[in-house]
Amino acid sequence: MIYQERESLRKLAKCWNSLSIVAIESELVDDVIYESQWVLTPIKGKKEFLLYLNSKFEAIKSSMKYKGMIVTAEIAVHPLIHNRPCIVLSQFTDGEMWQALILLSNQGDKIKRIDVCFIPDPSVAKLTGEFPL
């Protein structure tokens, strides 16, 4: 189970590092759930999530052109959640850094749930130096 979760995390990180949904499209169950501590309601369903993520990536690409934003997704483990594998998503804009933690759960070999959060604190995660491309 841990191996498959790590592979799924790598594919999701690749998605963020390339700002393209291609790496993740076939990796989601049809009734995937995406929740974020910044969004009031969960996004349910593969189609809805991919539309949301693609829209987010297009907005980031635009900001990268005009504001010099950089976004990276690095594989990590978090000590406060039993060294669970995760992604630390970092955004650099105008000399400031913002981070989020991405956790996921699998159903078999597909991603069932994606959670984006700031609690537990992403800065406490142990980074691996792996930025899947």
Image: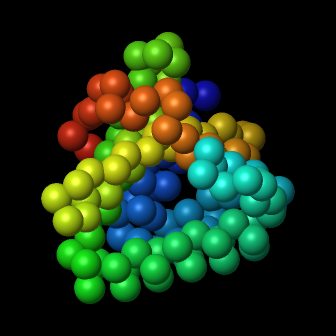
Q: Residue at x 37, y 46 (%)?
A: 99
Q: Residue 6: x percent and y percent?
A: 47, 37
Q: Quadrant of the N terminus?
A: top right
Left or right: 1, with 13 as reference point? right
Specify the farthest residue to the left. 95
66, above or below 11, in the image: below
Q: Quadrant of the C terminus?
A: bottom left
Q: Residue at x 64, y 65 (%)?
A: 26
Left or right: 100, with 42 as reference point? left
Q: Residue 122: x percent and y percent?
A: 39, 34
Left or right: 131, with 34 as reference point? left
Q: Residue 3: x percent and y percent?
A: 50, 32
Q: Residue 120: x percent and y percent?
A: 50, 27
Q: Nearest the camera: 71 or 21?
A: 71
Mark yes or no: residue 3 visible.
no
Number of numbered labels in the structure image: 0
Q: Quadrant of residue 27?
A: bottom right
Mark yes or no: residue 118 visible.
yes
59, above or below 12, in the image: below
Q: Residue at x 64, y 72 (%)?
A: 52
Q: Residue at x 40, y 75 (%)?
A: 60
Q: Nearest the camera: 48 or 30?
A: 48
Q: How is the image coloured?
A: rainbow
